[in-house]
Amino acid sequence: MTPTLVIVPGLGGSGPQHWQSLWETKFGGVRVVQDDWEHPTPAAWTARLHEVIEATPGDLVLVAHSCGVPTVAHWAARTGGHARVRGALLVAPPDVDLPLPDFPAVAALAPQPLGPLPFPALVVSSETDPFVTLERAQAFAEAWEAEFITAGEAGHINTDSGHGDWPEGEILLSEALHAWTPPDISRF
């Protein structure tokens, strides 16, 4: 059985043309729906993530974008993870420890948890992401004991930067699933 994707969006919830929404439809994942998409807090956002993980049967792979990434890191730090979480694809992590004038609410997720994650993870970041430097994203991956891949000059890897379906991301997801699941598990 293929692991279920748990879609963990950032601010705004990833609109209908965002690759997370398209993947949710294409692969049949479940979405973490926050009560307040514009004002994240570690307590509220991680509690909702935990509810979705507990309510979703079978093996899971977390697919987080932007503020969804520190949400996953906070959740892992608070709970120690979950035995059914096989891995996490962490895309475009923002630097919540730096002031982001256009998005001051992001600071509520600071400080960024920097402990090892209790499951394998792949961090994907862009060389031109306006919300994190490549070096800082690499430092997150190192602290989380995650693999790191640069997406090149790809902006924030969202709809605004031209990443609707994001086929390169699907390839990364497929390769990660292959690495994180036993050989008798079917994959995308």
Image (cartoon, helix red, strand yellow):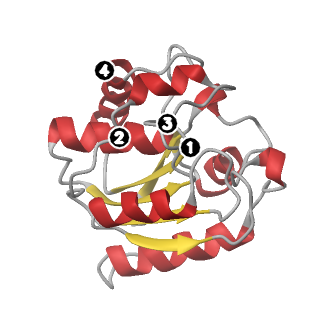
Q: CA distance from mark 1 to mark 2?
A: 12 Å
- Provide the residue designation for mark 1: 66
Residue 54 occupies quadrant: top left
Looking at the rendered structure, the secondary structure element under dot 2 is: loop
Residue 143 occupies quadrant: bottom left
- Provide the residue designation for mark 4: 43
Q: Residues within 10 Å of mark 4 (few under 14, many from 20)?
A: few
* Numbered tag placed on residue 150 in the rendering: none
Can residue 186 be seen from the camera position used here? no
Q: Of the residues tagged 4 and 2, which is closer to the observer? A: 2
Q: CA distance from mark 1 to mark 4?
A: 17 Å
Looking at the rendered structure, the secondary structure element under dot 4 is: helix
* Numbered tag placed on residue 112 in the rendering: 2
The first of marks 1 and 2 along the sequence is 1
Q: Residue furthest bottom?
A: 183
Q: Is residue 120 above or below residue 162?
A: below
Q: CA distance from mark 3 to mark 1?
A: 14 Å
Q: Quadrant of the N terminus?
A: bottom left
Q: CA distance from mark 4 to mark 3?
A: 20 Å
